[in-house]
Amino acid sequence: MGASEKQKMLAGEMYRPGDPEIQADQAAAKAWMVRYNASLAAPASERRALLRELFGEVGDDAVIRPPFHCDFGYNIRIGRSVFLNFNCVILDVVSVTIGADTQIGPAVQIYTADRPRDPAERRSGVEFGRPVVIGSNVWIGGGAIILPGVTIGDDAIIGSGSVVTRDVPKGATVVGNPARATK
């Protein structure tokens, strides 16, 4: 017997997102988001406890300000003292790892979900994921978009509104669309 659609998704292989098991996981994440996004006035410690219900890992003193949106949550790992400002989106069909002390501005979007380049294959409705890794002590400005498969090195800075289409080396500052290193 072959791998389930969820197993294919988690492995970064082509999968069908309409699969009932995948849909059930997304429904559970949606129900969790209703609770989490209603917790804005709650102390950070209570919101962190909610994060630990869904995320794969949540470091001490991590803060995500609601509203926050994700696909599944269980593929997200955030280190200690990570901060995500209001209205961030993480599409986590595969792993998203955010290192300790990283600061992420409002309305940042992190995508792992991708689509086939072949039009016939894309029309069939399959998709796949590519992991995103964000190092420690990274600063991502508001409105930035991180595309599937990108790795951002420790101590990097991503300018507000940048679209990060490729890996960013340790300590680099990138800006623009597509994001490019500053001189």
Image: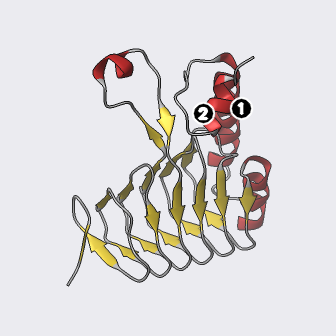
Mark 1 vs mark 2, CA separation in Å: 17 Å
Secondary structure found at label 2: helix
Secondary structure found at label 1: helix
**Total marks drawn?**
2
Locate residue 168, reporting x and y percent. Answer: 38, 70
Type of amino acid under label 1:
Ala
**Which residue occupies 44% across, 79% down?**
170
Local crowd size for mark 2, using a 10 Å CA cut-off: few (<14), some (14–19), many (≥20): many
Q: Which corner quadrant of the image does residue 120 belong to?
A: top left
**Which residue occupies 67% across, 69% down?**
79
Residue bearing the label numbered 2: 9
Residue bearing the label numbered 1: 28
Locate residue 80, reporting x and y percent. Answer: 69, 74
Q: Which corner quadrant of the image does residue 108 belong to?
A: bottom left
Local crowd size for mark 1, using a 10 Å CA cut-off: few (<14), some (14–19), many (≥20): some
Specify which label sits upstream in the sequence, 1 or 2: 2
Image mark for residue 88:
none
**With 27 as the anchor, is 111 left or right in this view?**
left
- Nearer the observer, 160 or 23: 23
